[in-house]
Image (tube, rainbow, N blue to C red):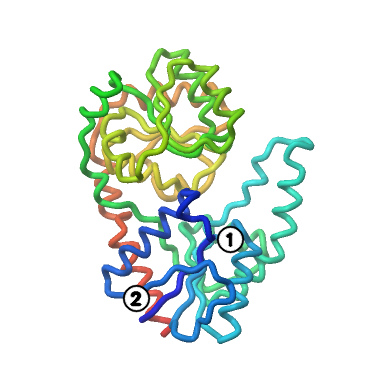
């Protein structure tokens, strides 16, 4: 079986959750004996491939052009949508008016992508319901949650604590931008006197400076390899990700596997995926976030969420399920 994954051209240089999900999916499918290639060439000759796997619908025009190329040879198409309408969370006003306009304009391509796929692989039932409601379609689908690498079970947290002279801290891993809501965490941890560690690339420089002004004692780390995160997770007391939404947040899974207590947003697919193993807060509610952060910080660590992740969310299980989907199409 030979599969071509279509993915945005800059997935190696602009690393985000979709890129990590793609690379990990490919890695573990190859371990299962499946031949895989990754391409961004929308005019690539696809004659030698059994299935074309489209990945992400954020850049809808690109993904639509990939789909058109696959349909020329009547290839079977699998779609991992990673879909959520982020524009519903944007503040009102002219600042984000273009973002709303552009997203709405690209929805005509998204609908064609969803309609053209032979099967859709959402990460949750909630994601699929949103697709059906937003585009008025019914499609064949199989829920394939994002996986997590078992390597995050292991890590030396003491090395990180000694290097940065910090203990019992709140960690937030993710792009530094309004969507991830680090500014609220910066203000609350400053008020509570709890050390705060931020890890991730700066997507919004003004927002980064707001965070640093709100809490001058933030430890900010960037430019590290994804595999290096494990020791930071193992050192942290809490991983907090009170974003506008998460579906459900790969870093939540990584941190949970490393044994962190988790506080995350109640928007997106988090509750469906994480059930009662983590704490939730509304990203707009400062008082609730503060209260839940205190609760999560003082909660004794246990292995319940870790064991739940091992049973349900390792990449080995996710890719076994993807392979089963492929088998129905060839």
The image shows residue 301 at horizontal and vertical percentages of 25, 31
Residue 90 against residue 68 in the figure, above or below: above
Q: Is residue 222 left or right of residue 99?
A: left
Residue 35, label in figure: 2
**Gap in Å between the C-alphas at discs 2 and 1?**
24 Å
Q: Quadrant of the C terminus?
A: bottom left
270 or 29, which lies in front? 29
The residue under the point 30% across, 45% down is 227
Q: Residue at x 22, y 29 (%)?
A: 159
Q: Which mark is residue 296?
A: none
Q: Quadrant of residue 153?
A: top left
Classify residue 147 as left or right of residue 201: left
- Per the image, the residue denoted by label 1 is 57
Where's the N terminus, which quadrant? bottom left
Q: Is residue 218 above or below residue 40?
A: above
Name the residue rendered at 27%, 40% in the picture: 258
């Amino acid at each position: 079986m030979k599969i071509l994954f279509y993915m945005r051209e800059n997935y190696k240089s602009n690393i985000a959750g979709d890129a990590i999900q793609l690379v990990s999916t490919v890695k573990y499918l190859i371990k299962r004996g499946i031949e895989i290639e990754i391409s961004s060439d929308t005019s690539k000759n696809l004659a030698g491939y059994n299935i074309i796997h489209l990945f992400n619908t954020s850049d809808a025009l690109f993904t639509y052009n990939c789909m058109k190329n696959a349909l020329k040879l009547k290839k079977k198409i699998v779609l991992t949508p990673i879909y959520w309408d982020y524009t519903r969370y944007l503040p009102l006003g002219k600042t984000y008016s273009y973002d709303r306009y552009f997203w709405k304009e690209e929805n005509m391509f998204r609908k064609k992508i969803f309609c053209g796929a032979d099967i859709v692989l959402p990460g949750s039932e909630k994601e699929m319901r949103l697709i059906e409601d937003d585009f008025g379609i019914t499609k064949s689908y199989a829920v394939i949650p994002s996986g997590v690498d078992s390597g995050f079970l292991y890590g030396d947290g003491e090395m990180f604590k000694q290097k940065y002279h910090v203990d019992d801290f709140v960690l937030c891993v993710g792009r530094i931008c309004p969507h991830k809501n680090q500014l609220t965490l910066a203000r609350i941890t400053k008020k509570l006197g709890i050390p705060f560690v931020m890890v991730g690339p700066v997507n919004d420089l003004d927002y980064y400076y707001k965070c640093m002004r709100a809490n001058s004692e933030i430890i900010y780390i960037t430019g590290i390899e994804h595999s290096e995160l494990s020791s930071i997770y193992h050192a942290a007391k809490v991983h907090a990700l009170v974003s506008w939404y998460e579906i459900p947040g790969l870093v939540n899974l990584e941190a949970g596997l490393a044994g962190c207590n988790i506080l995350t947003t109640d928007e997106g697919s988090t509750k469906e995926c994480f059930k009662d193993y983590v704490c939730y807060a509304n990203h707009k509610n400062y008082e609730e976030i503060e209260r839940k952060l205190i609760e999560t910080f003082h909660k004794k660590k246990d292995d319940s969420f870790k064991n739940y992740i091992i049973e349900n969310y390792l990449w080995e299980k996710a890719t076994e399920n993807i392979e089963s989907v492929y088998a129905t199409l060839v």
